Amino acid sequence: MAATGASGLTRRQLGRSALALGGAVAVAPFPAGPAEAVPASGRHPTLRHGSAERAGLLSAHLRRLVADAQAFLGPSPKHPWYAGAVLLAGRGGTVALHRPIGAAVRYQAYDETTDTGVEFPADQQIAMAEDTVFDLASVSKLFTSILAVQQIERGALGLEATVASYLPDFGRAGKQDITVRQLLTHTSGLRAWIPLYNAPTHEERLQLIWDEPPLNPPGSTYLYSDLNLISLQLVLEKITGRTLDTLLHDEITAPLGMHHTRFNPPAAWKPRIAATEDARRPWSGLDRGLVWGEVHDENAFSLGGVAGHAGVFSNAWDLAVLGRTLLNGGAYGSSRVLQKESVELMFTDFNTAFPGDEHGLGFELYQHWYMGAMATPRTAGHTGFTGTSLVLDPTTDSFLVVLGNSVHPVRSWRSGSAPRVAAADNMARAVPVRPRHGRTAWFSGMASATTASLALPALDTSCGDARLRCALWWDTEPRSDVLTLEASTDGGASWQPLAFTTARHGEPPREHPTGTVTGWSGRVWHRLRAQLPPHRQLVLRWRYATDRVYVGRGAYVDGLRVEASDTVLFDEARPADAARITASGWAAAAN
């Protein structure tokens, strides 16, 4: 199900509004064969359950992740965001959190006259379980994308080749120049979706795709579109001579041991599948009643349940295996499904021409609207309309799976991605930041719509040669959340930004003439230097201001020290000096 309309709003814009209520790269085929075994000596990490400590995570924040997720089982703000969910989080080869909450099956129908759900009798409701299987909706696009990149590796598919070179009928209506890359990065110009399910036969559904003109010139605009991955499915089936469900099994799920991942789950799986929507017009395109055990997306349903944009069913553990495989560089245990270079491409932004809509091959990148504070330029993931999501952070080697049945009993009960953001914020906080000096560092916190300040006492810098030194760590929502170094010469009545430089190991210093930092810093400590203006009563402070929507991981300051010639004016390491720091919203944190 497309999460954007013909108006051209991006998924990021839709997520932001609800919560608030590219450059081309030419690549040659990589030498690779089918999904292959890795030599025993080259086994890659596999998953096992373990403690937060074993995963290098902070258990308190994983507990908070669960508590926050449970809150969305209640009014959010009027109805539950989901009837239930399965939460899975880990780092490295350790799954430190795997928790079901709520119900997999609760409602038998939706009553539109009262806007309420009609519940099954209590003895017919099914609690969520660790192994509950979900309709992944658009998370399915990741599987189609991986299958395409495998064919690029093997030389059977060209990233910059036109789609029409494989499917001549696709080239009609002005689509002759659309490339495979543009399908994978949603820059083809095709509209978000069309109701293929209204066509009575498969041939007529294909005819709708062949006759569909681009909404925008190919390559000129980012517009998330189901049609891109449906078209890519048709290419894959043409060049391989195999159906997409067969490709999924042979090339991904069988080699990786993902035994609970497939299109069209058998009837025997139904008791373990989370129900979705009471699908009826006008909110659904088809009158189907309670959808349970069959694909929710109307177009995927009309295509026989096997579609490039939707239709894959899976559970949290299998998705974590997929995530671990990609974080491993394409291998899991003794099996390899992608070359490391291919994974790098999937995690590389091809949409540099469209800031805010960063996209690799199939994977979305750096999207705070559902990745929350896990978002970095390298963080990759995807969401699904039914309430699913997968987020992978290569920087911290961490992964998060949130699977919820958020269209159960009806899609209008949920909006935005607040539960995904809350889970990702807590997961990001669970990855510790070690202080640069000593046992604690000053931490700004991760609250939205706040201003936090950290001030030194008034210092005499009138000698004219005073310098501030400290260690600085920041990771904020770019441009929206800003950390500023400021100085006051009138006792704090007014403040002026103070220019400084930062440097990280192995790189030249970087100037910050506006006295601010924002966005991505690499999640490493930087050395900071600032020349201070001469004054007998100079006050310095850090001010961290966030907007009301999303936040990053925050900011840390450590080892504050002010020197003038051979004199130390302030040193945080001295207890008497540290006691004179004034903090509002900042806290001394051990990690």
Image (cartoon, rainbow, N blue to C red):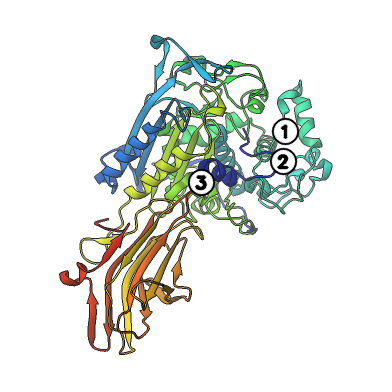
- Please tell me whether mark 2 sits on a helix, a strand or a loop: loop
On the picture, is 170 further left or further right than 420? right
Q: Residues within 10 Å of mark 2 (few under 14, many from 20)?
A: many
Circle 1 residue: 194
Task: Specify whether residue 338 is in view.
Answer: no
The quadrant of the rendering that contains the C terminus is bottom left
Q: Residue at x 45, y 47 (%)?
A: 372
Task: Measure the alpha-carbon separation of dots 2 and 3.
Answer: 22 Å
On the picture, is 79 further left or further right than 201? left
* Dot in front, 1 or 3: 3
- Please tell me whether mark 1 sits on a helix, a strand or a loop: loop
Residue lying at the far right of the rendered structure: 173
Pointers 1 and 2 in contact (C-beta within 8 Å): yes
Q: Earlier in the sequence, mark 2 or mark 3?
A: 2
Instruction: Give the numbered dot on residue 191.
Output: 2
- Please tell me whether mark 3 sits on a helix, a strand or a loop: helix
Q: Residues within 10 Å of mark 1 (few under 14, many from 20)?
A: some
Mark 2: which amino acid?
Arg
Q: Residue at x 28, y 49 (%)?
A: 56
Q: Is residue 343 above or below residue 232?
A: below
Task: Name the spot of residue 295 as percent of width and height, x first.
Answer: 58, 24
* Quarter-of-image position of residue 156: top right
Residue lying at the far left of the rendered structure: 575
Circle 3 residue: 369
Q: Earlier in the sequence, mark 1 or mark 3?
A: 1
Front residue of 469/296: it is: 469
The quadrant of the rendering that contains the N terminus is top right
* Quarter-of-image position of residue 401: top left
Pointers 2 and 3 in contact (C-beta within 8 Å): no
Mark 3: which amino acid?
Trp
Task: Name the spot of residue 490 as percent of width and height, x first.
Answer: 36, 77
